[in-house]
Image (cartoon, coloured by chain):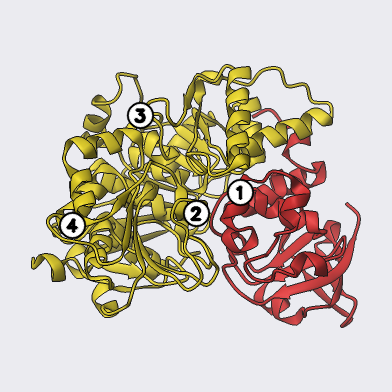
Chain colours: A red, B yellow
Amino acid sequence: MNKLKGKVHKYDRDNIDTDVIIPGPYLKIHDHKELAKHAMEGIDPKFPEKVSQGDFLVTGGNFGCGSSREHAPIALSQTGIKAILAPSFARIFYRNAVDGGYLLPIEVDEATFKKIFDGDELEIDIAHNSIRNLTRNEQYAMKPFPELVAKIVEAGGLMNFKPASN
Amino acid sequence: MTLTEKILARASGRERLSPGDVVFSKVDRVMMHDVSGPGVIKVFSEWEKKGVKIDHIWDPDRVWVTEDHFVPAADRVSAENIISLSNFTKKFGIKKHFKYGLGQYGICHTLSHEEAMVLPGEVYVGGDSHTNTTGAMGAFAAGLGHTDIAYVLMNGEIWFKVPETMMFRIEGNMPDYLMAKDIILQIIGDIGTDGANYRAMQFEGSVVEQLTMEERLTLTNMTTEAGAKNGIIEPDETTFAYLRERTDAPYSPAHCDSDAEYSEVFTYEIEKIEPTVAKPFSPGNITVARELQGTELDKAYIGSCTGAKLEDLREAAKVLKGRHVKIRTEVLPAAQSIYMKALREGLIAIFMEAGAVVGPPTCGACCGAHMGVLGKGEVCVSTTNRNFPGRMGHVESQTYLASPMVVAASAITGKITDPRDVTGN
């Protein structure tokens, strides 16, 4: 997988839930572009305007807790977000992001989380599990994807992934 | 092996499984509703655009569908989602489609037990995070997103990382002023909203043995709020008797091994738990109801898969009987069959005589969808499961989560109230 490069949008808050990422009334919407207009509406209604294609979201732990709505990773990815860096993710959000091939949920430790600031420019090298902060000239490690998740990421989502005989 | 490990081992054709193993597990039952269904349909259409031919699904008889979130159709978009859901079930030969206004229908998690759609020992996945609920029947039950559900519809299997199991033992004699809701709120308050992330939460002990099936379902329902992959209770005579009234389908329950390993064991003495409330804006932000007495409310809501089962309505009615509500109060039974039973038992008359409005089964305002959403600054006490900012309406509204008894008592006083302070018990 190629290196990813983009700007950081940081929200220093734990437990950002799916009601914040894409509020309940929009659950009836299944048009991906329309969902993007409401991404992160519960925390920052201007979020979609701020994001450029390829940017990163950096947030506190347990990101995406709450409902199973796949609208959440869809809305974020449609704004242009390519990866989310957080100390931890809620399980359904994590697998929706990976299995749908929308964006990468990247786990980083608390120390790394604190070193990255809003507006920083990052380059993420998935193959080497490393993150370079171009703004601060620093290097961090990301937690490697578990084996199966890495294969699904490589395939671009579960649809393109053929499990070996079980 | 634990109960969760035993069920996943059987479904993935393994002799033995340990936490951390990743397996492709066969699925016995799969569910989608009027929010996840159209999402799945969208995934199918994306796959078709990429050249995948989809003219049939894996097993239409193992799939069931309900209309619950935006019904009765909240607006044109909701109505059209329901049309596309109907077209989908017709196209792929899915016979179990519970439609509103056509006999039995209701909230998916309520139908899963009320209609015995899932049986002990089975692997059940649903396009909804509270699919965990059904684990109280001794099944492995977990929520998934649209892509995963679409994958299951095509392949009849899905990947899981085998979770560690946290065991919660609840001991003692259940007092009549407490409900399972108080227990699970206390647990979430103790372990936190990420306290069970990626793990299974299992419940046992003398209190769990005493609890009815519906009350057990409240425990597993809110394991989702602690981040758990699944909640589970070993099936016993209570489970089997509940099922005998609903189905004659055969099933093979799984049981824990005596040497099962748990990542943590928590023991609670029920006598130490009091009527409990989760304050805004987290299900883990708990305190006892009496600490909050005097908190002014605008509305009381008795609804959802968590808090509008038949026993939830019975307990609320006991408190409301012969009394009047002081704030706007809404009661929405969780399924048509429960509504009917409540009607026959006289509960609906008690609610209406108290001044409450009784609405049709729907997820409704629990997820801020429709039918009673909160306006800016409004404060609600609710039998539902989540109180994140904006969950039930405006981002500046507030929701306190509590048992049906606490919600009923609070409806009468207009302030957060311990049921003992109304009924005098």
Residue at the spot of label 4: B320
Q: Tell me how far mark 3 sits from mark 4, CA to CA.
A: 29 Å
Tell me the element at label 2.
Answer: helix
Which label is found at residue B367?
2
Q: Which residue is mark 1?
A: A27
Q: Residue at x 51, y 33 (%)?
A: B31
> Mark 3 belongs to which subunit?
B
CB-based contact (under 8 Å), mark 2 and mark 1:
yes
Q: Which one is nearer the viewer's eye here, A33 or B257?
A: A33
Q: Position of residue B286 (x, y in %)?
A: 36, 72
Determine the residue positioned at 34% across, 54% down: B330
Amino acid at pointer 1: Leu
- Relative to residue B399, is residue B54 depicted above or below? above
Gap in angstroms between the C-alphas marked 1 and 4: 34 Å
Q: Are marks 3 and 4 on the same chain?
A: yes
Looking at the picture, how far across and down is residue B287, in whole percent?
32, 74
Q: Label 1 to label 3, Cα distance in Å?
A: 26 Å
Q: Quadrant of residue B337?
A: top left
Image-quadrant location for residue B381? bottom left
Q: CA distance from mark 2 to mark 1?
A: 10 Å
Q: Residues within 10 Å of mark 2 (few under 14, many from 20)?
A: many
Disc 4: host chain: B
Amino acid residing under circle 3: Glu
Q: Earlier in the sequence, mark 3 or mark 2?
A: 3
Q: Which residue is located at x 38 percent, y 26 percent?
A: B103
Separation of residues labelled 4 and 2 (CA atoms): 25 Å
**Which quarter of the rendered picture does the C terminus of chain A lie within?**
top right
Disc on res. B115: 3
Residue B133: quarter of image: top left
